[in-house]
Amino acid sequence: MLTAGFLFLHPKGENLMKQLQFALVISCILFCFQAIADSIIKTQTQGDVTFVSGGVGGDERNAMQAIRGDFNLSLLFTVQGTGEYLSAVKVNITDKKGNTFLDTVSDGPMLLVSLKPGHYTVNAEVDGKIVHKNASIVSNKRTSLSFIWTQ
């Protein structure tokens, strides 16, 4: 049985205490970062679909990256050759039968979506220019799509 006194007095106990402190600090940081992410961006639902959009500014972008693993479809909206990100993108996601699963306008250049496994068409529109992409959602895998518009 190890006691606190043993940990401080024994040479190997000091390393163990440092490792425990490090693990505690990392756990606190990760917990706080998730709490910050939850307060910066708001998860929304439409029917059975859960989604979140944002990514404007460093804090929002970091928050979106922190929760990205919770969603199976990740969309990014940019302008070709400029590095410029787009927001206020109209997004419509349908299945092969034409059933609409999501119809929204992005709050930023990133849109994270949770969909049931299947094949979908994602339509994204900016200034009347529509880009169509197909997405195959498979259990336990994330699909990422980039939508790029010319100037």
Image: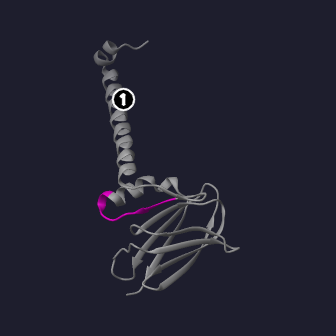
Residue 57 drawn in magenta: yes
Q: 9 or 5: which is nearer to us?
A: 5
Please state the extent of the stretch shown in magenta in the rendering. Answer: 51-59
- For image coordinates 62% across by 72% down, the residue present is 94
Q: 8 or 105: which is nearer to us?
A: 105
- For image coordinates 67% across by 74% down, the residue present is 98
Q: Is the residue 13 above or below the residue 49 in the image?
A: above
Within the image, what quadrant is residue 31 found in? top left
Which residue has dot 1 on it?
A: 20
- For image coordinates 38% across by 43% down, the residue present is 30
Residue 31 drawn in magenta: no
Q: Specify few, some or many for label 1: CA neighbours under 10 Å numbering under 14, 14-19, or 20 or more.
A: few
Q: Give the residue at the far right of this rendering.
A: 97
Q: Position of residue 64 (x, y in %)?
A: 41, 58
Q: Give the residue at the far front of this rendering.
A: 47
SS label for mark 1: helix
Give left or right: position of 29 versus 48.
left
**Which image quadrant: the N terminus?**
top left
Within the image, what quadrant is residue 100 found in? bottom right
Q: Give, as a three-letter code, the residue at label 1.
A: Leu
Q: Where is residue 29 in the image (x, y as percent from the top left)?
A: 34, 41
Q: 76 or 5: which is nearer to us?
A: 76
Q: Position of residue 112 (x, y in %)?
A: 49, 62
Q: Where is residue 149 in the image (x, y as percent from the top left)?
A: 43, 83
